[in-house]
Image (cartoon, helix red, strand yellow):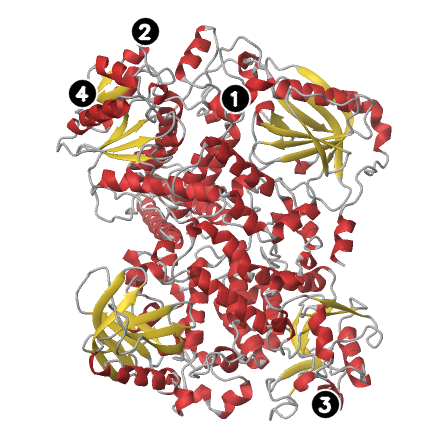
Amino acid sequence: MNEKKLVQNFKSYINVSLDAKGEKNGSLQEVKPNLLNGELVTGAAHSVVMLTPLSEWDRGRFGSLFITNYKLSFVPLENSSNDEYCQRNFLLGAFDVPLTGVGAVWLTDGGPSRRRRLMPYGEVPGKVKGLQVICKNMKVLTFSFANSPIDNGRKIALALMHHAFPKRHDLLFAFEYREPYYPTLPSDMNMFQRTGDWKRELERCECPHWRITCINGTSDAFMLTAGETLIVPSSVLDYNLMESARHFRSGRVPIWVWGRAEGAALLRSGELLPTEQSSTAESVLLEQVRRSHPKLTPPHVIYLCGNTYTNTGGPGILPPLATLQTSYKKLADLCTPTTLGGFWIQDSQYYSILDSSKWLRYVANCIAFADEAAQHLGNNVTVVLQEGDGVDYCAVVSCLTQLLVDPHFRTISGFQSLIQKEWVALGHPFCDRFGLPRPGNPKELTPKDATTAQIAPVFLLYLDSVWQLLQQFPAHFQFSETYLTTLWDCAHNHIFDTFLFNCARDRELAVTRNFVQRPVWDWGEQFSEQDKALFYNPLFMGVKPALPSQRLSLSPQGGGGGAEPARLRPASSVAALELWAQCYERWLLPLDARGAGHVQLHVHNYSVRAEIQQLNEKLTSLSILSRRQSNSDESAAPRRRNVSRFFPFSLNRSDVIAANLDSMQVSLIDASQLVESQSLLNAPD
Amino acid sequence: MDKHNSSELLSSDFSLSKNASSDSLDSDSKSSSLNSKHGQDSPHVLGDIYLLDGEKVTSVARDVTYLCPYSGPSRGVLKVTNYQLHFRPTDAVPSQGTLSVPLGVVSRIEKVGGASSKGENSYGIEIFCKDMRNLRFAHKQENHSRRGIFEKLQQLAFPLSHRFPLFAFSYSESFPEDGWHVYEPIAELRRMGVNNDMWRITRINDKYEVCDSYPSIWAVPAAANDDLLRAVASFRSRGRIPVLAWIHPSSQATITRCSQPLVGVSGKRSREDERYIQLIMDANAQAHKLFIMDARPTANAVANKAKGGGYESEDAYQNADLVFLDIHNIHVMRESLRKLKELCFPQIDQTRWFSGIEATCWLKHIKCILAGAVRIVDKVENHKTSVLVHCSDGWDRTAQLTALAMLMLDPYYRTLRGFEVLIEKEWLSFGHKFQLRIGHGDERHSDADRSPVFVQWVDCVWQLQQQFPTAFEFTERLLITIVDHLYSCRFGTFLFNTERERVKEEVKTKTVSLWSYINSRQDLYLNPLYWGPSSFGASSPPSPYSRPQVVLVPVASLRLIKLWKALYCRWNPTMRQQDPIYQRTRELVALRAQLEAAAAAAAGDHAARQHRLGLTPPRVASPHHV
C-alpha cells in the first residue's frame, strides 16, 4: 500500500500542462532578462518550463531561460505578485542565480528526477530535455525543455557549463562589471589592508609587547599567502622570522591576531614541516612568544588537526579538508531533495542521515576548540593555534575565539572587520575552497588542475558555528541569522571582490590591472534599507547602548556597569546544536507555513523596537516643546506581520498551507520500524 | 526561597535550579526575583528545609553521599518527608545547592551493594525516577545505616502500597482562586453553542451508570433519545459511546470520540450504533460523509477482533470512511521513552546522538500523532466534514488526537485557562487512566499499564509551540510545570482514573487543584510573543476567522519535530539553555509600556502648558496602544 501511494506521487512531468500557453510563442521573444552594466547574454532558451520544486502536481511556470556572463536567469512569461522573495536583491531577481553560485548541474528527462550529472569541462549530450541546477546555497531549480525549440536545451547547457565553470580567473564577471563604485563603508570598520589598519588593531587591544613588521611586503617575503603586514613578538628579529619560516608549512610562523591588555595573546600558525630542526625552530619562536607576555607565561598550543609529532588526536580534532567536503555533500543531499517522494523518504531517516554526515560534529569541534582557547585567554595564557597551512581551521577557530572573548566583534562592523582580518588579509584561499579558477594563472584550467585545489566549505563551517553561538546567546550579537544567511549567499556572488581571491597578493595584482574592488560589506549595493534592517538583531543589548536615545536602562546581563564583559561559555556538545534551518532548508516548500518558526520572535521584537524608537522620538519632541505635531507618526506605527517560517527568504505566497495538507504522508512510516518486538505490537491495549 | 519554588525545587538538581529547571527557559539568574510567593502563606522553615502546609519530616540520615553524575559526590544530610526527599550538602560548595525531589516521581528504590561491598561509595540506595533521572546515594557501611531511610522511603514514596493516603490529601495550602472551578462542563458546552438544533446536553450518565469511565454530562445528537444511547453503549467497548468533543463554530462539523465497536470475529452489527453514527453525520448539514479515524495501526485493529473488539466495517456504516492513523499502543510508547531516557541520562554519547534519537522512535511516534491530528483538522476545517475518533478504549490515543486537534482548531484552548479546560475535559473527565498510567504511590514499577501517554501529548503540544511561537498564551514553562506535578502528588488534579472515582474520593474538597497554584502566578507562564485575542469571555466565542492564526496546521516532518531537550535533558548541566530569550523580550515589552506611559504623561503636560499659554490646545496624542 505504501508503495502504491509513493508511485502516485511520481507523476510524469513530461506532459506539463501546456494549456493554451503554447500559442503565445510569438510573444516569447519579447521576454528579456535584466542586464547589469557589462553583462551580456550568451545563451537563451524559450518556452521553458520551470517546475515548482517539491510539488505533487504537474505545476510549473512558462518562460525563457537565459545564461549571461554573470547569471542564470529565468524570466517568467507572466508576472505574478508572488514572484518576489521578501528579501529583494538589486542585482538578482527571484529566479536568478549568479553563475558562481551554481554547484552542480544534472540532466533530467524533463521531470524532477535526475538522470546524470554534467561535469565541468565534460561532454554535453546532443539532446537535453531538462536541466536541474543545484545551487551552492541549496536552492534547486529544475527546467524542462520539452516544449522549447529543438536545440535550445543543449545550447543552454553548453553556455551554462562554459560560463559557470570558467577556465581563467579573469573571466569572472567582476572583471567585466562596468558600474562605477562609490564606497560607503562604515567608518569603524577595519579592512586590514594597510599597515595602519593593523596598528589600529594593536592599539585597540592595548598590546605593547608586539611589533609590526613589513618584511612580508618586501622581496624577503616568506609568507606568500598573507599580506605585507604581520604582527610578531617585539623581541624577534625579521631575520629570525625568515629563518624559522622554512620550517613551517607555507612559511606560516606564529603571528599575532588578537590580545588582551593583561598580556595574553592569540596567535595562529601552520604545521611544522618534517625537517630536522623544525621543532627547535618552533621552540625558539614559542620562547619569543613567551617573552611577549608581561608575566612570561608560556603559551598553550592547540593542534586543531591533531599533533603529528606526539600523535595526539582523537574524536575532537578537525578532519582533513576532503573529509569536510564529503560531510558537506551529505548535508547538501539531505537538504536538496528533488521530488516530494524523495523528501518524505528522507524524512523518515532524517536524524540518521544527519548523524552520518557528521557536519554538526565538526561544528561542535570548532566551538569546543574556541571555548578551550577562550578559557586559556581568560586565564591570561597566550594561545597558539596550529593547523595545516594555517589558513583554514585556524581562521575558523581564531574568529570564534575572538567572538567569545571580545564583544567588539559581535557588532556588525566588528564582525566584518574580523572576517577582513582573519579570512581576507591572512589569506584564506577562497578561490580554491569555492572551486573558482586560481587568479594569475595564465594557463587555462584543465580538468586535472580542478581536482588538485581542494574544494571545502570551511567558510560555511565558520558561519554555521557563529549561528550556533547566536542560538545560544541570542542577545549578545548585533547581527541576526538573516545577516549570516545573506552573507553565505553573497559569498557566491562574484561581483564582489571580498571572497574572490586566494590572498592579498593576488588581489593587489588585479588592482594594478584596473580591477575595481567592491567589498561585499557595502550592503546598500544589493539591499534596501528595509532589508538591511533585518540584519540587526532586535534583542542585542549592545556593547554600548544600542539605541542612541535609550533613556531607561536596559542593563546587560552582567549587571554591574563598566565591568569587563564576561566571555561567552558556549555549550559544545553535539546534542546542544541545531541544524541551521534558515540557511539549509529555506527552499523546501513543504516546510514553509505562515506564522511558523523562530523568525516570529524576531518579527515581534523588531516591531517592539521600532515602537520604542518612535516613543522615544515622541518624548524628545514633546519635551522640547516643539510646535510641530508628532501625531503624524501614529499612523506609521509598525503593524505586526504574519510572516512565513523562512522569512525573509520565502516567496510572498498565500497557498502554502493548503498545498501542504494533502502531502503529509504518515503511511510512509513503516510500522514495523517503530516496534522492537512483535510482542509489544500484539499486547493488549 | 519559598514555597512557590517547589516547582523549581522539583526540577532542580543541586540547585542547578536556575540552570537546569524550567526557569532557565525564560528567566535568568537575575529573575530569581520570580521566586516570589506563589501562595498566600509563608513557608514553614524547619532547620534548613522548607516545608509545605501539611508536610512533615519523618526521617533523617546523616553522613550520606549524593553521587551526582555531573558534579561528582558530595556529603550531606538526607531527609525524607511525606512529600519529598531532601538532601543538603554539609561541605558548603557554593556551586552545589540542595536537592529536593517530590517522592511522587519515584518509580523504584533499590539497594546497591551489601555490607561487604568494597570500594568507595559502593553501598547505598539508588532511586529510579519517572522524570528521566536516577539518584544514587552512598551510605556508611557500618550498622546497616541505610536501613531506616530505605524503609521510610519505600513507605512514603509508595503510600498506596502501604495503605497510606497520598500527600495531596495532607497538603492544605490555600490560594486566591479555586482551580476546581476552572472547568464547568455546561459552560464549556455553551461556549461552543450547545444546546442547539442539532446537539443536546444529556445527564443520562449522572450516576455513572451508563459508562463508569465517562463524565456525568455529555453532548449528543439532539435526535438521539436516551434509549438509543443505552443501546449504543452496549455495542461500544466499556460503554464509551460517541459523544461530542468539539463543534466548529461556523460549519457545525464536529469531532466526536468513543471506543471501538464490539464487532468481534463474527462481525457483529448494531442497528442502533449504525443509526447513531448516521445521526452524528446528519447533525452536520455541510457534508454527507463522516470520517472515522481509528488511531491504531490496521494490524492492531484487526487483532482486536479476536478480543471482541474491532472496527466499523464500511458495509455496515454507509457514508462513513474509515482511516487508520498508525499510532502504536501504550507498550510501544513506554518502551520508546525508556530508550530515550537511556540516551539522555546521565551522559550523552556525542558520537551517535542523532542516530540515537532515531533509534528511540520517539520523534516518529510524535510525528504520527501530529500527522493524525492534522488529518482530523483538515477534514473538519477544510472539508467541513465531521470526524469520529477512537482507538481501542478511547482513553489514550483518542484523547491525544482529539485534544491536539482541538488545540489546532480553536484558539481558546491556546490560552492559559483554555488549556486547563482542555486538559480537564479531554483527559480528566473522559477518563484517561492517570492512576494506572502514572502509578501514583504504587510500588509496582513494572506494571504493564504504565505508559507516558499524557507526557507524549504534552510533547506534541510543545512541538506545536515550537512551530507556532506566537500562537500560545503560555510558554513551555507551563508544560514543564504540568509534567512535574503530573508526578508530584501534591495536587489532586491528576489523581485517580475517572471522574466517578474523583467524586467518590471527594478530591475537590479534600485536595488542592494544580490550577489554583498555576493561576495564582499566571505571569510566570505567559508568553510575551502571544498574538491573539487578549481575553476570551466564556460567553462570547470570538469569530474564528477574525484573528490571526486561528487554525494551526503544523508540518509533521522530522525536519521540524525536535527533541524536547528542556524536558528530557534538563538534568544535564551541559545541555542548558544559555540565554533567556523570553526574558529579554519581556524586558523590551516592559520598556515599551514604560515609554508609552511616559509619552502619555508628557503629552498631558504639554497640552496643559500650552493651554496655560493661551494657545489653542493641540490634538492630544492618545496613548499608543498596541
Q: Amino acid at mark 2?
A: Ser
Task: Characterize the local packing of mark 2: few (<14), some (14-19) or many (20 or more) Cα atoms within 10 angstroms.
Answer: few
- On the image, the x and y values in percent for residue B62 come to 20, 77
Q: Amino acid at mark 4?
A: Ser
Q: Circle 4 sits on which residue?
A: A234
Q: Circle 3 sits on which residue?
A: B230
Relative to A286, residue A365 above or below: below
- Closest to the observer: A154 or B462? A154
Q: Amino acid at mark 1?
A: Thr
- On the image, the x and y values in percent for residue B401 come to 62, 69
Observer-side mark, 1 or 2, equals: 1
Relative to B427, residue A537 above or below: above
Q: Are marks 1 and 4 on the same chain?
A: yes
Observer-side mark, 1 or 4, equals: 1
- Identity of the residue drawn at 43% across and 83% down: B443
Q: Are marks 1 and 3 on the same chain?
A: no
Task: Characterize the local packing of mark 3: few (<14), some (14-19) or many (20 or more) Cα atoms within 10 angstroms.
Answer: some
Q: Circle 2 sits on which residue?
A: A219
Q: Chain of mark 4?
A: A
Q: Residue A506: name its quadrant.
A: top left
Left or right of B197 on screen, residue A677: left
Answer whether residue B231 is visible to the viewer in this image: yes
Q: Amino acid at mark 3?
A: Arg
